[in-house]
Image (spheres, rainbow, N blue to C red):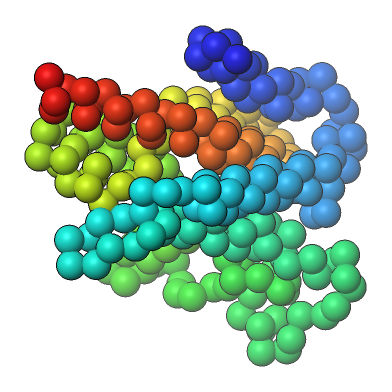
């Protein structure tokens, strides 16, 4: 699929994902976006695909990493991405708790907001104006962690690679995978559409549904990133090597 067709397809997918809020009745939307509903499992499937693709790229990698003092035979960044997406998959479906029908341990149930077997719903600190609280909610909640990951990995690193020669050499040496910046733009579009949808439907009971659809789209975007990252990474680094040898 050509580049412009890929971009149009992803934009179309994002827009269509939010159309149920404008055409379906409230009960149908609630059913599709409930816990263990269509959107939650579909989002988990996309994250799992992203994980499998990451492990595949790691397995097939031949260049490895050169961290100057330490060299690694296979690209550890793909391995870390695979583990990250695998954990995200498990967390999205509470590690199969409702599928396998096991109960939440009492010690976890006490500190988990939704009483589920997962980490991302654990209430670590109270939301207030203290520095610790602000730092936690800016860096470590699932939403903020994902936002920061997208900004750094899918925007800042590719931008630095394009614009800064010394950083480009360093990133090439350690073999950091270079993502397409489109991924960052898709994230921004999804976020804006979700906020607009939440504003337009003006129904507090459906706000959770908007979040579920947003997370589903984020899962799709991560799968798209891992489908395209290897070819993009090789392309930009080959261009860099060509310029260096010219």
Residue 113 at x, y = what percent? 64, 70
Which one is in front, 158 or 26? 158
Give the image location of residue 83, x and y in percent: 54, 61
Q: In the image, what residue occupies the spot 63% across and 36% down?
A: 220
In the rendered picture of this protein, how many numbered marks are placed on residues? 0
Q: Is residue 237 left or right of residue 4?
A: left
Left/right placement of residue 123 relative to residue 156 reads right
Image quadrant occupied by the N terminus:
top right
Q: Is residue 84 above or below residue 242?
A: below
Answer whether residue 138 is visible to the viewer in this image: no
Give the quadrant of residue 226.
Answer: top right
Residue at left offset 64%, top offset 75% = 112
Residue at image position (28%, 63%) is 71
Which residue does the image show at 74% across and 59% down from the upper left?
93
- Can you say whether 45 is above or below 100 in the image? above
Q: Quadrant of residue 240?
A: top left
> Residue 232 placed where, x, y %?
42, 29
Reply above or below: 200 against 203.
above
Of 41 and 193, the residue lying toward us: 41
Residue extending farthest bottom: 107
Q: Is residue 171 left or right of residue 106?
A: left
* Left or right, residue 79 beside residue 163: right
**Residue 91 appears in view:** yes
Query: Considering depth in this image, is 119 or 44 the residue closer to the camera?
Result: 44
Quadrant where the image shows the C terminus: top left
Image location of residue 179, percent across then percent down: 40, 35
């Amino acid at each position: 699929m050509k580049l412009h067709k890929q971009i149009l397809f992803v934009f179309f997918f994002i827009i269509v994902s939010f159309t149920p809020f404008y055409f379906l009745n409230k009960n149908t939307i609630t059913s599709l976006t409930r816990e263990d509903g269509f959107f939650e499992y579909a989002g988990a499937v996309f994250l799992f695909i992203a994980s499998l693709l990451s492990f595949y790229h790691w397995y097939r990698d031949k260049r490895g990493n050169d961290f100057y003092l330490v060299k690694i035979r296979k690209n550890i960044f793909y391995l870390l991405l695979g583990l990250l997406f695998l954990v995200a998959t498990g967390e999205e479906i509470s590690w199969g708790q409702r599928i396998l029908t096991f109960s939440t341990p009492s010690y976890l149930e006490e500190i988990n907001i939704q009483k589920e077997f997962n980490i991302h719903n654990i209430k670590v600190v109270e939301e207030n104006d203290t520095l610790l609280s602000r730092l936690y909610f800016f860096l470590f909640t699932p939403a903020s962690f994902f936002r920061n990951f997208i900004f750094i990995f899918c925007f800042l690193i590719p931008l630095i690679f394009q614009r800064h020669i010394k950083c480009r050499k360093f990133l090439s040496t350690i073999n950091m995978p270079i993502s397409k910046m489109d991924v960052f733009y898709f994230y921004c579009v999804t976020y804006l559409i979700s906020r607009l949808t939440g504003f337009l439907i003006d129904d507090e009971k459906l706000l959770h549904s908007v979040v579920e659809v947003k997370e589903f789209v984020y899962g799709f975007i991560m799968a798209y990133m891992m489908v395209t990252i290897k070819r993009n990474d090789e392309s930009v680094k080959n261009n860099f090597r060509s310029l260096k040898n010219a």
